[in-house]
């Protein structure tokens, strides 16, 4: 019975591995038509990666919930959870960015002959995720707030990008996803947010009163509203709202 929460954690890892498999199988690239015109090719299978990362996040929530419910929290469970998170929310999202970088570089002049080095910055993301999780495991103070943005939040943000790209018909939005410099900025920003000491609120509730959880309830209400209005595009907006609503924590902790 004590290993039931760990089975949820391993399921998180399985979903992360499945996300990696579909990312590598489908990829994002260019195809050349009969008249020599190059077109974008983003097979729908890559959307399964977004689904698997989302499922990993759901399971990641429930393994801790089940462990607390069954009173079977353990040091092994904590370590196992972090190892699974590195794969599901570090490596898998990094490969999504890697594939977008492939597409961005390939579209440039002589892009198909460009150096592999242009794609390597995507690997900074899982390195930052591993650093963030290792530091978390050694810090016993991060219960109702975190130091740095949680790795699953970053993973879910990146998982939304293929869905936004596919469903958007706005040229400006497509252009953003096909600009390698924007991707480098995204990788640097998300990596810094994870390894920074910036206080970020945890979504764990001590109680469910509005007075003691104002920021959390505002985020929940805002998230639901944004999803209804903007669907997949809501995810980056919710991520930004999460960061902004966490800012008052700095003053609260300092006092």
Image: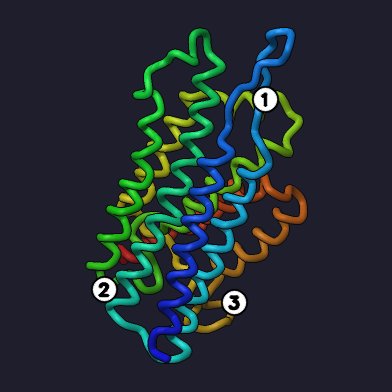
Task: Name the spot of residue 236 as percent of width and height, x first.
Answer: 58, 46
Q: Residue 6: which numbered mark, if any?
A: none
- Kindly check if marks 2 and 3 are in contact, taking CB atoms under 8 A apart as contact: no
Q: Residue at the spot x=31%, y=50% of the render? A: 195
Q: Earlier in the sequence, mark 2 or mark 1?
A: 2
Q: Residue 172: which numbered mark, if any?
A: 1
For the residues labelled 2 and 1, the Cα–Cα distance comes to: 44 Å
Q: Quadrant of the N terminus?
A: bottom left
For the residues labelled 2 and 3, the Cα–Cα distance comes to: 26 Å
Task: Name the spot of residue 35 as percent of width and height, x first.
Answer: 73, 8
Q: Earlier in the sequence, mark 1 or mark 3?
A: 1
Question: Disc 3 marks which residue?
Answer: 210
Question: Disc 2 marks which residue?
Answer: 140
Q: Residue at the spot x=45%, y=77% of the render? A: 7
- Above or below, 156 relative to 24: below
- Kindly check if marks 1 and 3 are in contact, taking CB atoms under 8 A apart as contact: no
Task: Name the spot of residue 147 as percent of width and height, x first.
Answer: 33, 59
Q: Residues within 10 Å of mark 2 (few under 14, many from 20)?
A: few
228 with respect to 196 (left or right): right
- Above or below, 55 relative to 27: below
Q: Residue at the spot x=44%, y=80% of the render? A: 5
Q: Residue at the spot x=48%, y=46% of the render? A: 93
Secondary structure at numbered mark 1 = helix
């Amino acid at each position: 019975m004590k290993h039931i929460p760990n089975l949820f954690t391993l399921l998180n890892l399985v979903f992360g591995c499945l996300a990696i498999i579909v990312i590598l199988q489908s990829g994002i690239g260019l195809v050349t038509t009969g008249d020599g015109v190059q077109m974008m090719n983003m097979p729908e299978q890559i959307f399964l990666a977004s689904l698997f990362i989302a499922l990993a996040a759901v399971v990641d929530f429930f393994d801790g919930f089940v462990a607390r419910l069954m009173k079977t929290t353990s040091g092994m469970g904590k370590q196992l959870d972090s190892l699974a998170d590195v794969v599901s929310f570090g490596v898998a999202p990094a490969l999504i960015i890697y594939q977008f970088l492939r597409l961005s570089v390939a579209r440039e002049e002589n892009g198909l002959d460009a150096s592999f080095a242009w794609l390597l910055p995507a690997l900074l993301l899982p390195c930052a995720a591993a650093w963030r999780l290792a530091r978390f495991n050694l810090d016993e103070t991060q219960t109702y707030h975190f130091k740095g943005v949680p790795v699953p939040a970053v993973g879910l943000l990146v998982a939304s990008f293929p869905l936004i790209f596919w469903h958007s018909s706005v040229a400006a939005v497509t252009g953003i996803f096909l600009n390698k410099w924007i991707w480098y900025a995204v990788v640097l920003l998300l990596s810094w947010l994870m390894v920074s000491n910036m206080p970020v609120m945890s979504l764990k509730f001590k109680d469910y009163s509005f007075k003691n959880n104002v920021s959390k309830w505002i985020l929940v209400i805002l998230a639901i509203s944004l999803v209804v209005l903007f669907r997949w595009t809501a995810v980056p907006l919710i991520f930004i709202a999460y960061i902004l609503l966490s800012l008052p924590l700095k003053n609260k902790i300092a006092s």
